[in-house]
Image (tube, rainbow, N blue to C red):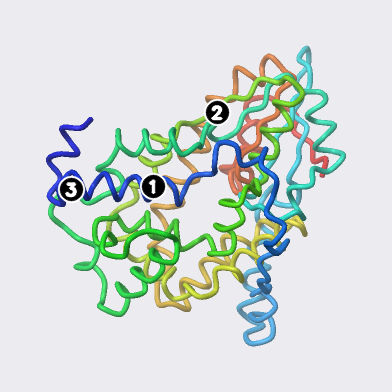
Amino acid sequence: MFSLVRKMTAGSARVLAALGALAVVVCVPADAAEQQPNVGLAATCHGINMLDEIRAATPDVYAEIEATASKTANARAVLWKVEKAGVAPSYLLGTIHMTDPRVTVLSPQIQDALLHSDTVALEVADVSADATNAAMLKAASLVLFTDGRKLDGLLSSDEYKKVQETLSDAGLPGELAAMFRPWVVSMILSVSSCERQKVKAGQPVLDMKIATAARARGLKVVGLETIESQLAAMANIPDDQQVAMLRAGLKYVNRANDTMETLLQLYLRRNMGAAWPFHLVLARQAGVGQQSFSGFQKKIVDDRNRAMLVSAMPMLKKGRSLIAVGVLHLVGEEGLVEGLRKEGFTVTAIE
């Protein structure tokens, strides 16, 4: 592990500093769900729904998004009952990785699903600082450039300046920005400064709220994936697509609260079929075509859906399990709802 780190052109000290700082930025504190939230922070991050803007300014584009959403399978519910003859029912929950109380206050239906479960499976069971840092050290080449390239050589000077400013705002030294692979910066861009502060202050995202509720009931909490496998999925997106996606994200770097509020509204309205076309429209407005997201769709959504299904199957065959993963893993023809039906389960929308 450390031999790889020592060989990196940036030098071991800078590499370790970069990985350590990044782990603090991207992870959820291990005890976040148990901490008392900082009451000085606003309950929401005051974003606006960008779809309202799109509808007013370009109604044809809004109609395009809604048309795509209406054709997306299994996108109108976030909680599903999973049944098969001779097996106790299980549940499938699509989560949204946010701290907003509009989603972290568990509904009666979710609480009932927990009541009738013995095991809860999340994407990753442990996203503490220690676990995240250890995973990044093991897989440093997935996070940092190791071939002599630097991020500032792949972007314009203006774009790279925005990257440095964003990372500095997230608590990462701006001088380390050139070391990170494009997907890492895109991930940081996707979370607003307000949301990062709320997590740092101890406000749990929905997934962690579910894990805490499960442990309080004495339920077993497991992960369908590892941090390393998630890092590998992101790193395996073709490099040119990583750069294109980063450029699209930089276009809206000052609107992170708005993009998060838009996705939250889609989640609350049970219209998750509009989430992906909304992102593609933003990218198109930034001059980035849909083809630049094909690697993301395959590596981050479709391939992981299949792997999650394999990991979840023993629990579902046993019954009394709650599978809670990002909601976009449920929707569409390649989503988990459809995948479970192909495996012979009856999957029925609850909420």
Image coordinates of residue 61 in percent, x first then y, are 61, 78
Give left or right: position of 274 versus 320. Answer: left
Give the mark toward the camera: 1 or 3: 3
Give left or right: position of 157 versus 130. Answer: left
The answer for how far apart the CA atoms under marks 1 and 3 are is 16 Å
Q: Is residue 344 above or below residue 66?
A: above
Q: Tell me, for residue 40, which label it has, or none.
A: none
**Residue, disc 3:** 146
Q: Secondary structure at mark 1?
A: helix
Q: Secondary structure at mark 2?
A: strand
In the rendered structure, are the residues bearing label 2 and label 1 in contact, judged by CB atoms less than 8 Å apart?
Answer: no
From the viewer's side, name the closer residue of 153 and 305.
153
> Quadrant of the rendered structure where residue 66 is?
bottom right
**Residue, disc 2:** 223
Q: Is residue 170 above or below residue 50?
A: above
In the rendered structure, are the residues bearing label 2 and label 3 in contact, judged by CB atoms less than 8 Å apart?
Answer: no
Which residue sits at x=29%, y=44%?
142
Image coordinates of residue 317 in percent, x first then y, are 66, 16
Image coordinates of residue 280 in percent, x first then y, are 51, 67
Say which amino acid is labelled 1: Met
The answer for how far apart the CA atoms under marks 2 and 1 are is 18 Å
Q: Secondary structure at mark 3?
A: loop
Image coordinates of residue 18 in percent, x first then y, are 30, 50
Which residue sits at x=20%, y=46%?
13
Give left or right: position of 266 versus 161. Answer: right
Earlier residue among tags 2 and 1: 2
Earlier residue among tags 2 and 3: 3
**Residue, disc 1:** 234
